[in-house]
Image (cartoon, rainbow, N blue to C red):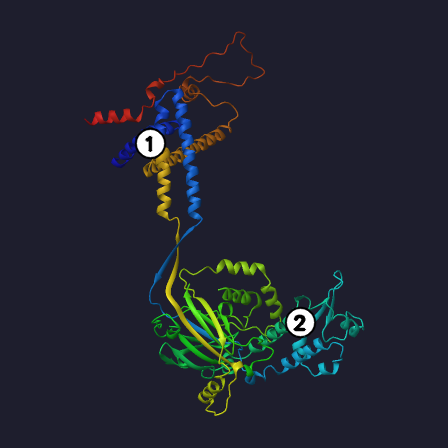
Amino acid sequence: MHVKKYLLKCLHRLQKGPGYTYKELLVWYCDNTNTHGPKRIICEGPKKKAMWFLITLLFAALVCWQWGIFIRTYLSWEVSVSLSLGFKTMDFPAVTICNASPFKYSKIKHLLKDLDELMEAVLERILAPELNHANATKALNSSIWNHTPLVLIDERNHHHPVVLDLFGDRHNGSSNSSASEKICNAQGCKMAMRLCSLNGTQCTFRNFTSATQAVTEWYVLQATNIFAQVPQEELVEMSYPGEQMILACLFGAEPCNYRNFTSIFYPHYGNCYIFNWGMTEKALPSANPGTEFGLKLILDIGQEDYVPFLTSTAGVRLMLHEQRSYPFIRDEGIYAMSGTETSIGVLVACLHSCFQDHMIHHCSCGHYLYPLPRGEKYCNNRDFPDWAHCYSDLQMSVAQRETCIGMCKESCNDTQYKMTISMADWPSEASEDWIFHVLSQERDQSTNITLSRKGIVKLNIYFQEFNYRTIEESAANNIVWLLSNLGGQFGFWMGGSVLCLIEFGEIIIDFVWITIIKLVALAKSLRQRRAQANYSGPPPTVAELVEAHTNFSFQPDTYPHSPNTGSYPNEQALPIPGTPPPNYDSLRLQPLDVIESESDGDAI
């Protein structure tokens, strides 16, 4: 009973709050809010009420508009850039060097035997198209050619281009192949690579403007298929070893050798060697700027053992990068020519992995020239016959590039090295003889010269100066900026604060509560109306209900009239006696506060 009485008192206090109608709720809010405008709406006369209502509505709209601008600016994630210059002793960068040729031809020749013979036949067909090469092509490995052949496309008639097989005996079903092919060696023909699926129903042509580019890309594609089937341990043995490639090394005043380099295998360039990578040891500092305090290298690239059709560039691929970072030397490296001394002054100034993921997802295998995730296989013609066609489509896909560009964000911290390159012939003609004699004796223990100018590279890598430039990006708009601007606009236009927003949230909750009460009352009234609709006549009055339940002894007897019984001539319907209804004023409900006052008086 005490709990029920306490709940009744709480309900009574709630009833004295905002009220049960929307008008009462709005009047209560305007009278109690801490915002300045709404109070004037209910306190002033009719004209000033309208004026203050329009002013409050206008300023509220301005606040919402300004809030939208600030929130949109914050969500744009703009940045501010600051530039600072400094001078300090810096760590020497990691230096990655690779030979332009990934493998020694003497060690990999047996794997490329069929491909090289086919390449020579293709070059003969291109250089001497008028000769008959039918006997020469019979001894070739046709499986390589049939999978991905080179074709000639006659585009002199743009409406009806003609595709000619480079070694075929037919020309679109006709027998005039030789005549047509002779004519097709004019300017109107292009060379292309035909890439087909396994069943040959879907083919694409990759066109080239130069036959040199076409045969080079075709050879690289076929060699990729061969190398993908060879274990990496064997490929490392077929590449250039560090003790043969690095002839001399000097860092500052300290001598070094190939053991100071970390070896990694890079598919494009074979064995690559990284100096000062910092994976297992501390990074080496640079004592002073200048050539004398940098890294000096003499390298032997062994150009006489290059793969003739795989690599057309001779030299060393070089890249400077941060310690403990993977060198993407194919995209960011530079070449140093053989037979020269290259001096590089340094000013401290993902996409492959994403492509490989797309390659594995669409083609079920990974490309040999890109990093391979663990548990996956490289693409080759034996296990994945459709990989070349799939790779070509994926490489030309604009959607794939846009997806990878969107995924590969810039790193938060990145150090880049701006290089200044100078080159000179080395060694000079006057000193060539004795320098090559000494280097040959150190490498091969030979009294004869075993080295030549075309295979020797000298590198000097050093800091030009210790000045550095730092470019920092920071968020232009943070959460403190957003909250201060939102609060400033609300206080300036409306004279409000966070408490005013809480009050507004309270009135929204009351508004929802009143709406729920009205909907519940409406549902009850509809339910009652449906119940009353079941009666045929109007509902009985109170007097009829009372009369039906009282004075049962005064009810008239009704008898059925028989046809033999006569009726009284002056018979009239007598009134039915009954009891008058009670005085319903005594049953009137009293307000809750009156009941509470009476109950409190009774308690006293």
Q: Judge whether residue 371 can be spotted in this image.
A: no
For disc 1, the neighbor class at 10 Å (few under 14, some 14 to 19, many from 20) is: some
Q: Residue drawn at (73%, 64%), measured in percent from left and top?
A: 155
Instruction: Read off the residue under disc 2.
Output: 211
- The residue most toward the bottom is 447
Disc 2 marks which amino acid?
A: Ala
Helix, strand or loop status at disc 2: helix
Disc 1 marks which amino acid?
A: Thr
Q: In the picture shown, does residue 304 fall above or below 322?
A: below
- The residue most toward the front is 430
Q: Residue drawn at (43%, 64%), measured in percent from left and top?
A: 416
Q: Position of residue 215 (x, y in %)?
A: 64, 73
Instruction: Read off the residue under disc 1.
Output: 33
Please count the marks in the image.
2
- The residue most toward the right is 175
Image quarter of the C terminus: top left
Q: Nearer the viewer, residue 571 or 136?
A: 136
Q: Position of residue 202 (x, y in %)?
A: 67, 66
Q: Position of residue 307 (x, y in %)?
A: 57, 80
Which labelled disc corresponds to residue 349? none
Helix, strand or loop status at disc 1: loop
Determine the image quadrant of residue 586.
top left
Q: In the picture shown, does residue 104 fall above or below 581?
A: below
Image quarter of the N terminus: top left
Q: Judge whether residue 457 can be spotted in this image.
A: yes
The answer to whether marks 1 and 2 mark residues whose Cβ atoms lie closer than 8 Å is no
Q: In the picture shown, does residue 54 fall above or below 250?
A: above
Q: Nearer the viewer, residue 383 or 241?
A: 241
